Amino acid sequence: MFAVSRTLATRKAYASARAIAFFLTVTAGGLAADLLTKHYVFHSLLTDPQAAQRLQHARTANQHADIRDLLSVCSRDVCPGVRFTLSTNPGIVFGLRVHRLAVNIATVGAMVLVLAMFGSSDRRSAFTHLAMAFIMGGAMGNLYDRLLAEVRLPLAGVEPIRHQVRDFIDLGQLHYPYIFNVADALLVIGVAILVLHWVLPPRRAATQSSRGNAGNRAAD
């Protein structure tokens, strides 16, 4: 019995150096892609010579607006249907407002859960590990913003925007109303992969079972 237990333990991802290395590499790559793109887009658009003029004009036209609502004037076309438009989100997905501390605690809890799921998964489930690494990298990227991000605007007397998630991918021309970032994309893709992984195997098993039953009835 102990030999069987040890054999089962060695099949888990936490006992596989290759699985751990793959998970950490993808997580680090996703985190780096998120933070580097945020830094590049915000820095390039806010240091544009016309950024200060556009922001000042928008501020003058709407003096009662929250400064974060004026960021959308900093925008640039990337390719047909895609723009970079600056935005910051003090809440969670789809702009829902939730207390920052609660969001941070929930995010850390989700990261711990993902680590536990990874450790207990089969070491050969590379597709599942990819999804979990996407989720981990995305969660870490947005958590970094909520803890440490600071957006300095080229306007005199305006305090930096702190502890808000930086968004910039704008698909409004494709009729998608929300601005998002790489971390958000990683989270959505990771969850989608996990859902497909959990849904498709039972369907395949049910199909194979029904075929087997049909074959048995035919033989009878």
Image (spheres, helix red, strand yellow):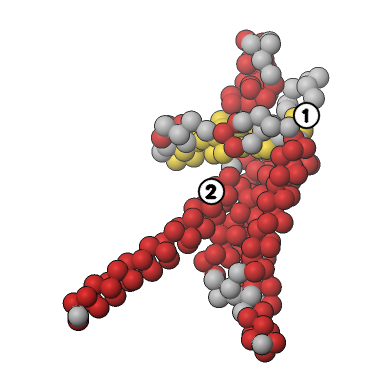
Nearest the eye: 64 or 58:
64
Q: Residue at x 65, y 55 (%)?
A: 136
Q: In this orientation, does residue 102 appear?
A: yes
Earlier residue among tags 1 and 2: 1
**In whole angstroms, how far apart are the C-alphas of marks 1 and 2?**
29 Å
Indicate the position of residue 13 as horizontal and vertical percent values: 64, 73
Rendered view: 68 above or below 25:
above
Which three-letter amino acid code belongs to the residue tagged 2?
A: Val
Q: Residue 128 lies in what quarter of the image?
A: bottom right
Q: Residue at x 62, y 31 (%)?
A: 96
Indicate the position of residue 38 as horizontal and vertical percent values: 65, 43
Asked if residue 123 lies left or right of residue 99, the reply is left
Q: Which residue is mark 2?
A: 188
Position of the C terminus by quadrant: bottom left
Picture disc at residue 216: none
- Using a 10 Å C-alpha cutoff, classify the residue at mark 2 as few (fewer than 14 neighbours), some (14 to 19) or many (20 or more): some
